[in-house]
């Protein structure tokens, strides 16, 4: 296999300082035939395996091998469909191998795969390995983690800066090979000359900040990219190296149709099919807006950049999910946003007699947000409290109270469902069951503290993990 001179490529993987086996695996493929290359581009993959015995090693290697073979043999030039299908075939292969060998039960792997074809890069994502785009001295995360902490960030219950130190940072909500089917996120962005793409496992991002990654790559002008990968891995090992670490860096020297127009493309807001627990504030606001109750501001759907973002940095465009996929679970507005609304308006809500005409605009905005909370919590118009004849402050209080109660009931229902699954599996000691029990315990604590949205997210995470454990039996 030849590597064309329109790019430079660096690759390296290390077992880390705490592990005895490397469960990470990476792959690269581009066709020798120029016509095929023009049709399919090049494929770059990073996988982070998990599972007892040798399961993680087998899962990651089998996934990389299957993705390359499936993509290589795919017909046509539909990159989105071919990449999605290749990852789905890898999921089926890992799942089947775990069924064939009982000692591999519960094994799985993340996958972050990119296809660079001409001046477009396509991203395929399952799990919490990552892909970044570096351009003009700025770096942006182009994939989104399928993890519990990312879910909490989406719900407004956790700040992104707290993700790497959170006790549940290793809880993955989506992986290859654990269930017979998997939802694959596919997105794409345009690229220009001198862009750099970096793929890595969480052994790097768990210990080295995005800012440090950017500094290291940016300072590597003229260095062999293999050396840059090694430098990043050395930094992770110096910080503890508690996990396997894998990095691939692809520097694009020229694209087939480079252009000076680097205006960010409009982000497509059509949602992809998520996990059972995927419910973000952006989705909640979109649903509320569809009901005519959303506030005027809205949250974006792309992953935020932790480093300064250049004006020309593109936002990833999400590919539509294939028809027939699983439906999205009803979204609930994040508890942090709900709490903020209550906190900001508490003086008005509970002392409406003290308000003046000058407070009217703020009260109207608060009422709009309260309506959005109620709608996003799943309350149909018929279920909303009657507010005729009430002041805006009293009406807002009624909507927020109803939203809180709806969130509490949803959390209780999720706990009941999770506990039902735990009864049949609580005697097992597989990693998936242990993670599920921890999520169940954390949800109970959140429920007691009246953090209902967080409680529901944790209970639903427990359900997903219990279901994965059942499927792995």
Image: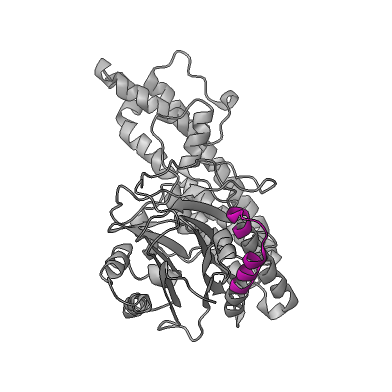
* Residue 226 appears left or right of 177: left
Residue 51 rendering spot, x and y as whole percentages: 59, 75
Q: Is residue 47 above or below residue 85?
A: below
- Specify the farthest residue to the bottom: 20
Residue 414 rendering spot, x and y as whole percentages: 60, 49
Q: Is residue 215 magenta?
A: no
Residue 81 rendering spot, x and y as whole percentages: 63, 54
Instruction: Place residue 92 in its image quadrant.
Output: bottom right
User: Which residue shows up at 58% across the image and 69% down it?
Assistant: 33
Instruction: Place residue 334 in its image quadrant.
Output: top left
Residues shaded magenta: 64-83
Q: Is residue 72 magenta?
A: yes
User: Which residue shows up at 63% across the image and 63% down it?
Assistant: 86
* Residue 15 appears left or right of 87: left
- Specify the farthest residue to the top: 389
Camera sees residue 301: yes
Q: Is residue 164 above or below residue 326?
A: below
* Residue 162 appears left or right of 151: left
Is 372 or 413 nearer to us in this picture?
A: 372
**In the picture, which quadrant includes the N terminus?**
bottom right
Residue 247 rendering spot, x and y as whole percentages: 42, 73
Q: How many marks?
A: 0
**In the picture, which quadrant includes the C terminus?**
bottom right
What is the chief secondary structure element of the magenta stretch?
A: helix
Is 356 or 232 nearer to us in this picture?
A: 232
* Residue 381 appears left or right of 365: right
Is 105 or 69 nearer to us in this picture?
A: 69
């Amino acid at each position: 296999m030849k590597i064309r001179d329109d790019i430079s490529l660096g690759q390296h993987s290390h077992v880390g300082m705490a592990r005895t086996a490397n469960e990470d695996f990476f792959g690269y493929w581009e066709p020798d035939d120029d016509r095929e290359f023009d049709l399919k581009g090049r494929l770059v993959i990073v996988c982070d395996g998990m599972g007892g015995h040798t399961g993680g090693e087998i899962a990651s290697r089998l996934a990389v091998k299957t993705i390359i073979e499936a993509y290589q043999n795919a017909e046509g030039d539909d990159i989105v469909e071919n990449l999605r299908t290749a990852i789905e075939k890898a999921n089926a292969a890992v799942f089947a191998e775990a069924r064939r060998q009982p000692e591999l039960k519960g094994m799985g792997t993340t996958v972050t795969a990119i296809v660079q074809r001409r001046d477009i890069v396509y991203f395929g994502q399952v799990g919490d390995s990552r892909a970044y785009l570096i351009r003009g001295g700025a770096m942006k995360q182009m994939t989104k983690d399928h993890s519990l902490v990312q879910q909490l960030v989406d719900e407004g219950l956790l700040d992104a800066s707290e993700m790497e130190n959170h006790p549940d940072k290793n809880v993955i909500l989506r992986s290859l090979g654990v269930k017979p089917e998997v939802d694959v996120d596919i997105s794409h962005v345009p690229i220009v000359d001198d862009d750099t793409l970096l793929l890595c496992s969480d052994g790097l991002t768990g210990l080295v900040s995005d800012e440090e990654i950017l500094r290291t790559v940016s300072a590597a002008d003229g260095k062999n990219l293999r050396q840059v990968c090694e430098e990043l891995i050395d930094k992770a090992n110096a910080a503890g190296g508690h996990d396997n670490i894998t990095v691939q860096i692809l520097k694009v020297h020229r694209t087939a149709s480079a252009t000076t127009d680097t205006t960010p493309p409009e982000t497509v807001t059509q949602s992809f099919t998520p996990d059972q627990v995927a419910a973000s504030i952006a989705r909640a606001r979109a649903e509320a807006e569809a009901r005519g109750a959303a506030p005027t501001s809205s949250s974006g759907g792309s992953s935020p950049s932790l480093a300064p973002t250049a004006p020309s940095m593109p936002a990833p465009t999400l590919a539509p999910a294939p028809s027939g996929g699983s439906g999205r679970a009803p979204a609930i507005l994040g508890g942090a946003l709900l709490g903020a609304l209550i906190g900001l308006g508490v003086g008005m809500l509970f002392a409406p007699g003290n308000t003046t005409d000058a407070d009217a605009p703020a009260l109207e905005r608060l009422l709009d947000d309260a309506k959005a909370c109620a709608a996003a919590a799943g309350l149909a118009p018929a279920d909303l409290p009657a507010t005729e004849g009430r002041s805006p402050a009293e009406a807002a209080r009624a909507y927020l109270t109803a939203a809180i109660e709806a969130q509490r009931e949803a959390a209780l229902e999720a706990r009941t469902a999770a506990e039902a699954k735990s009864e049949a599996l609580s005697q097992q000691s597989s990693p998936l069951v242990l993670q599920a029990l921890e999520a169940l315990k954390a949800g109970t604590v959140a429920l007691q503290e009246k953090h209902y949205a967080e409680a529901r997210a944790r209970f639903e995470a427990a359900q997903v993990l219990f279901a994965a454990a059942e499927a792995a039996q």
